[in-house]
Amino acid sequence: MICVRLHPSLRYMLTTKHLINLCVLLFLVLSVGCTQLRFPGQLSDVLLNVHVTASEVSGTYTIAGETNLPQNTPLTVAAVRYLSVDNSTAAQFNPVPTYSILAYQTVKVVDGKWQTQLNLWQVAPNGKYQETWQLEQARLGIISFKPSKDVIFLATLTPVEKLSRLEQKLARQGMRLASGTVRSTPEGQRYAQANQTLAIALPRGETTPPQPQLDQVNYGWGYRYLIPKEPQNPYNLEFPGDRQTTAPPRPEEFLQ
């Protein structure tokens, strides 16, 4: 509360207009002061934000942010696109949209900042650029998905130990996780998360088809019907036609 004491000689000089202006001024002072003043023992919210920018390479995005979490705190950065079943009959059995993790990386906080890059595009066997869920959909050929136009970029704090231990450590430093960033899994595990949503179109174009990996052929056995070539023997094993020495023959070399 802010109290204003006026000199007795000035109390009766204030007109109604002056009183209104004074009240407005006090309201502005209180409004600004409430955002800056902090009571003793009150904890400040932990800063955790996400900034996403498109890179020069198509399908690649730079994700960065600032935070006052402790040094080397691990964060999991992921790009997620939600999918709905593009079939009225199938949608009745599974009305809840599913999602596909397009890419993810683990980063650590360094001097209050973190940054990484995610490539959302994969190369299909025919050389076309696609997202992960498109590759699986083409391979299975069972369900048709309708993708959301938005991609959600997430920065998730999932400590190895329980989140409550980190909150106790932050409380000793006068900080706390903002209530809007703390969430829980269906199993009851708590985590903190910040996100940014961007409208990103599906991949287009194509490139050179990738070479098939041996672990993707014949369940990892490769082409078993092909006999591998043996390396060339570096030594000449043919019997020489002429003697290779001028020494006289030894007795055991003659016919007995």
Image (tube, helix red, strand yellow):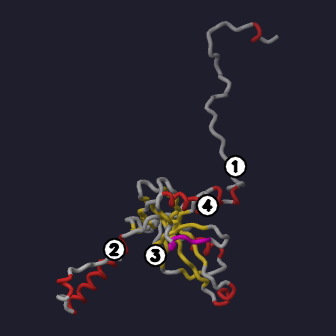
Q: Quadrant of residue 160?
A: bottom right
Label 3, on which residue? 197
Marks 1 and 4: which is nearer the front?
A: 4
Label 3, label 2: how far apart the Cα atoms are: 33 Å
Q: CA distance from mark 3 to mark 4?
A: 28 Å
Instruction: Pick the residue in front: 112 or 4.
Output: 4
Please say if the residues under marks 3 and 4 sit with CB atoms less than 8 Å apart.
Answer: no
As helix, strand or loop, the secondary structure at mark 1 comes to loop
Residue of label 2: 33
Q: Are marks 2 and 1 in contact (CB under 8 Å)?
A: no
* Identity, as a three-letter code, of the amino acid under mark 3: Thr
Tag of residue 227:
1
* Depth check, front residue: 253 or 16: 16
Using the image, tell me which numbered label, if any, was put on residue 55: none
Mark 1 → mark 4, Cα distance in angstroms: 54 Å
Instruction: Magenta stretch: give its range.
Output: 179-184
Q: Is residue 68 visible?
A: yes
User: Compared with residue 90, is residue 101 higher up or lower down, i.e. above or below?
Assistant: above
Q: Mark 4 highlights which residue?
A: 162
